[in-house]
Image (tube, rainbow, N blue to C red):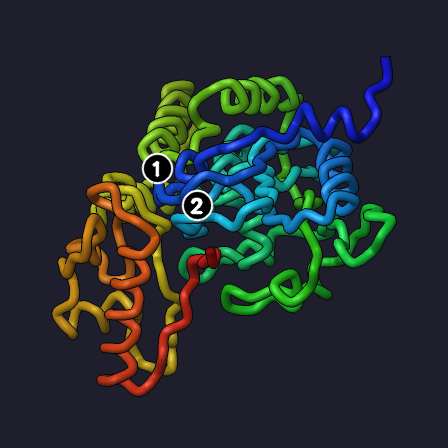
Amino acid sequence: MTIDRYELFDQLCLRHVRLSGHSSYGIGGYADYFAMPATVEQFVSLLEVSAVYGMERVVFGMGSNILFPDRPKRGKLYVSLKNMADLTVNESRWFATAGLPLSMLSLLGLISGPTAFPFTYLMPGSLGAGIYMNAKYYKEQIGDKVDMISYIDLSDPSLSLRQIRAEDCQFAYKQSIFQHKPWIIVGAEVTAPEHEGPISGAISALLAKYQGSNGKLSSLFSFYSFFSRELRELQAERVVIPEPMLDIERYRMGNRHFTYRSCGSFFKNNYAAGASIGALVDRLGLKGVTHGGAVVSPFHGNMILNTDQATAADILYLKDTVSEAIHRHYGFMPEPEVVIMKE
C-alpha cells in the first residue's frame, strides 16, 4: 500500500522531543516537532509537507557541533539526518550519505587497505556537517577528500537533487559555500583508497553494527566506546593501524574530549593572532572558570564543558567571558565554531 506524503509526515514527525538527547552537549529544551528520516525520499517528504504547513525548519546531523536553545521556538521542526548513515561501494568510488559519521570513514578506509581518512578518526560529527564546515585535523580537511556533493536547494520549490563539484565549493579554513546558501547536503562521492579483493561484505557488516548500536547516540562516551572498540577489533584481526590514528586517540583522551559533554573546540582559531584560541585562554588564566553547570575546560582552553546539567545560558555566559577577554587583551573577537541556535 502506498503511503502519501502527509501520512508519511505524520509517521516520521515526533512530538515534544527533548533536543538534549540529540546533542553531544546534552543541552536543549523540548522541540514541538522532531524527525529522523532514514532516506533522501523521506527527507524530501518532510520538507515538502512542512513547507505546505508553513513550518520553520532546522536540519542538522549528529548534533556534535550545535548548541540548542533551552526554550526552542514553538512550532519549529527539527530534523536530524543521523539515520541517513550508509555507504555504497562502486569500484574506486564510494557514495556516502550525509548522516554517516566522519569517524566511520577512517574505519572503512582500514577495511579497504591503506586508508586515506586517518584524520577523521574520533571526529564526532557526520559527513554532511563535516562538509558544511570543512572539518579538519591539523593539515588535512574533508574538502580535499570529496569529489561530488549531492544537495537539496531549499529555495527551489521542486526540491530536486542537485550536485556540485568539490572544486566549486569554496572550501577554506572551516569554510564552504554551504554556509552561505540554503542548501542541505544529503551525500557525497568520495574517492576510495585502492583495495584488493571484495570488501563490500566487511563494510556492510560494520555499517550494520553502527546502525543497530549505541553508535547512533549523540553521547560522546558512547561515540568513543563504539569507535575505539571497532578499531581494537580490526587490530585484533591483524589490520595495521596507522600511527596517526593512534596519535589522535592519545591526544583526544589526554585532553579529556570524551569525559564530559561538549561540542569540542568552541571557537575557530585566528592564526593572525600567532597562537591558538586554547593557548590564548590559557595565557589569560581562564581555564577552569565556571558558571552554573558549565566550565572552561581545565584540559583544553578552547572547550566549554557541560559538567553538571548546564543550560545553554551557562555555556553562552562563558562564551562571552572568553570572547570579551580575548578582545580586550588581543584586539579581536573570536568567531564561534559551534553553531548557536537562538530561542
Q: Compared to 11, does 40 lie above or below?
A: below
Check residue 64 in the rendering and tell me which mark sits there, or answer none. Answer: 2
Dividing the picture into quarters, in which one does residue 109 lie?
top right
The residue depicted at 81 percent of the width and 46 percent of the height is 161
User: Residue 116's spot in the image, x, y percent?
Assistant: 54, 45
Which percent across, then down, holds residue 71?
Answer: 42, 48
Does any portion of residue 155 appear in the rendered image?
yes
Amino acid carrying label 2: it is Ser
Q: Which mark is residue 270?
A: none
Identify the secondary structure beneath mark 1: helix
Query: CB atoms at circles 2 and 1 under 8 Å apart?
Result: yes
Residue 250, visible in the rendered structure? no
Q: Residue 239 at x, y = what percent?
A: 44, 27
> Residue at image x 35%, y 60%?
266
Tell me: 198 left or right of 216. right
Badge 2, how many Cα within 10 Å: few under 14, some, many 20+?
many
Label 1 crowding class (10 Å Cα cut-off): few <14, some 14-19, many 20+? many
Query: Is residue 24 toward the left or the right of residue 310 in the image?
Result: right
At which x and y percent is residue 141? 52, 57
**Would you say 104 lies left or right of 41 here?**
left
Q: Is residue 110 left or right of residue 176?
A: left
Q: Name which residue lies at 41% across and 71% down.
A: 335
